[in-house]
Amino acid sequence: MLRSLLDKLTQPAPEPLQDDDARLAVAAILVRLARADNDYDAAEKHAIDRILAQRHDLTDADASALRGKAEALEASAPDTVRFTNAVKEAVPLDDRIAILEAAWTIVLTDGERASEEDALMRMIPRFLGINDLDSNLARQRASKAL
C-alpha cells in the first residue's frame, strides 16, 4: 500500500488520489510538520490523532493506526512538494484550507514555532494552492482553538 502510494506521488503527472490515499498523504504532511523540528513528541502525536479522528470520523485506535502508516510513508517519501501537489489535485479547496488549519494546529501544539516548521509552513500553502490571506486566517483559527 505505501509503495503504491509512493509510486503515485512520484509520477511526473500524478493522477488524483482516491480517498484513502489522500487521507494518508494528508496525515503524512502532518507528520512531516511535526517532525520538522526534530522534536516529535507525544503532544504532537496526540494532536495528529485527534485531527485525523475528527476529520475522518475515526476511532482513536483507527486514527493512531493511520498516523502509524503516515509515519512510515513520511519516512520513506521524497519531498514535501510531491505530497502537497498530490493533495492539491485530490482535495477540494475548502478541504485544503481545513488541512492547512490542521497543519497550523500541529505547528502550534508544542507552544514553539521552530524555524524548520516555519519554513515548511511558508511552502505548504502555496503548494496546496492557498493564498496568504487564507493561510493567515487558518493560522489564527488554529491558534484560537488551542
Image: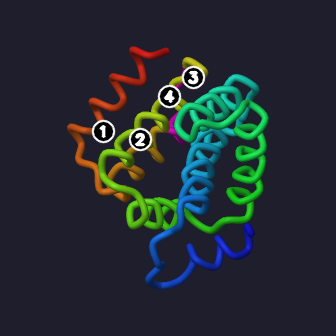
Q: What stretch is highlighted in magenta?
A: 112-117
Residue at 45% in and 38% down = 118
* CB atoms of marks 3 and 1 within 8 Å: no
Q: How far apart are marks 1 and 2 (CA)?
A: 7 Å
Secondary element type, mark 1:
helix
Residue at 71% in and 44% down = 67
Q: Name the residue under label 2.
A: 100
Amino acid at circle 1: Ser
Residue 125 position (above or below residue 17): above
The one nearer the camera, 91 or 118, is: 91
Q: In this view, does 91 lie to the left or right of 49?
A: left
* CB atoms of marks 3 and 4 within 8 Å: yes
The chosen color scheme is: rainbow
Q: For residue 115: magenta?
A: yes
Residue 42 position (above or below residue 124): above
Which mark is on residue 109? Answer: 3
Q: How far apart are marks 2 and 4 (CA)?
A: 9 Å
Q: Name the residue under label 1.
A: 135
Q: Position of residue 95 (x, y in %)?
A: 38, 46
Q: For residue 54: magenta?
A: no
Which mark is on residue 105? Answer: 4
Q: Distance between the residues labelled 4 and 1?
A: 12 Å
Residue 40 position (above or below residue 67): above
**Number of numbered discs:** 4
The one nearer the camera, 100 or 81, is: 100
Amino acid at circle 2: Leu
Residue at 66% in and 65% down = 77
Secondary element type, mark 2:
helix
